[in-house]
Image: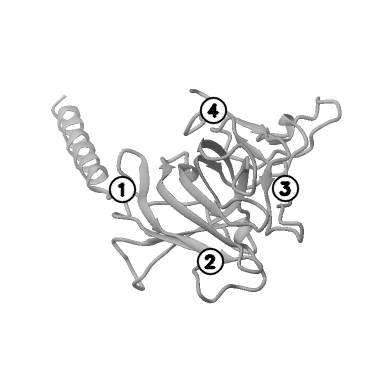
Amino acid sequence: MKKKSLLIAGVLVVAAWWAACLSAEPAPPCLVGRSEPATAAWAVKYTKLTGPASGPCVRGGELIGVQKYQSVPYNDPMPKLAIKAASMAVSTLDPNHPLTAIGTLPSDRPVDNMCSVAAFDPAEQDLANGRIVRFTWTNVNFFVTPNDPGTVMKGNVQITDNLPGFPPCTATYDVLGIWPEVTCGSDDECLPFPDYNANPPRTSGSGINPDYATVCSGNVIVNGPPRPDGGYPTEKACVAAKPFPSLVTQ
């Protein structure tokens, strides 16, 4: 009995020590779904807050690229975050303006499951013949948990445009985005898992985190720079179906 009591006491001591070690572990760093030429973009949908009913500032969503990077080689406590809209992805860059919006994470650790950037330097380009388009991003938040590694985000963006033939315009939007971009023709193509019993069978899943509720957008997601007529090419893509963070369990 004495040995058993000592064994139990020893186990409890080890358990307490292990729990203390676990509680002392630092929170994971801020994670962000990464976009590069070789990887997927984010598909974001826009909900208009202010602005005209039509014209070059009006759009339903966009593909964006997101990069988190460090200003110092190791353990940067305040890393940078860069956002580039697909409509800015021009082959001839305007050297007088930044192509990418840059902001600073105040900490590289989530706070209440959020990694947030309050303000960004604007991104602005002369897309053609003096057509200046500007994106100003604010209040960008990434949801970060063990199951959600920075692959759903929300924020705000202000878009200004002076396309010749239209009045200069400004529009502001709520933004809700999911990574990775998945093009689609129906809602079923946004489901995360295959379904061999479907008609026709769906032999692969979307690859989107199954935590998220998604839907196939209309053909409104801007996926590139403007055409010669000034309009933008668009596609259908899987976007959030619920308010941020668009969890299935909401």
Which residue is disc 1 drawn over? Answer: 27
What x and y, as percent, mark residue 124? 51, 63
Q: Residue 99: which numbered mark, if any? A: 2
Q: Check disc 1: other Cα within 10 Å, few if <14, some if 14-19, many if 20+.
A: few
Q: Check disc 3: other Cα within 10 Å, few if <14, some if 14-19, many if 20+.
A: some
Image-quadrant location for residue 114: top left
Q: Check disc 2: other Cα within 10 Å, few if <14, some if 14-19, many if 20+.
A: many
Cα–Cα gap, marks 4 and 3: 22 Å
Amino acid beneath label 1: Ala
Identify the secondary structure beneath mark 3: strand
Q: Going from the N terminus, do you reach mark 2 or mark 3 first? A: 2
From the viewer's perspective, tell me whether residue 178 is left or right of residue 129. Answer: left
Identify the secondary structure beneath mark 1: loop
Amino acid beneath label 2: Leu
Q: Residue at x 54, y 28 (%)?
A: 242
Q: Residue at x 48, y 48 (%)?
A: 158
Q: How is the image coloured?
A: one colour
Rendered view: 94 above or below 20: below
Amino acid beneath label 3: Thr
Identify the secondary structure beneath mark 4: loop
From the viewer's perspective, tell me whether residue 56 is left or right of residue 140. Answer: right
Q: Going from the N terminus, do you reach mark 1 or mark 2 first? A: 1
Q: Residue furthest bottom?
A: 95
Q: Residue 141: which numbered mark, if any? A: none
Identify the secondary structure beneath mark 2: loop
Q: Going from the N terminus, do you reach mark 1 or mark 4 first? A: 1
Q: Residue furthest right?
A: 200
Which residue is disc 3 drawn over? Answer: 234
Q: Nearer the viewer, residue 111 or 11?
A: 111
Q: Residue 242: which numbered mark, if any? A: 4
Q: Going from the N terminus, do you reach mark 1 or mark 3 first? A: 1
Rendered view: 56 above or below 208: below
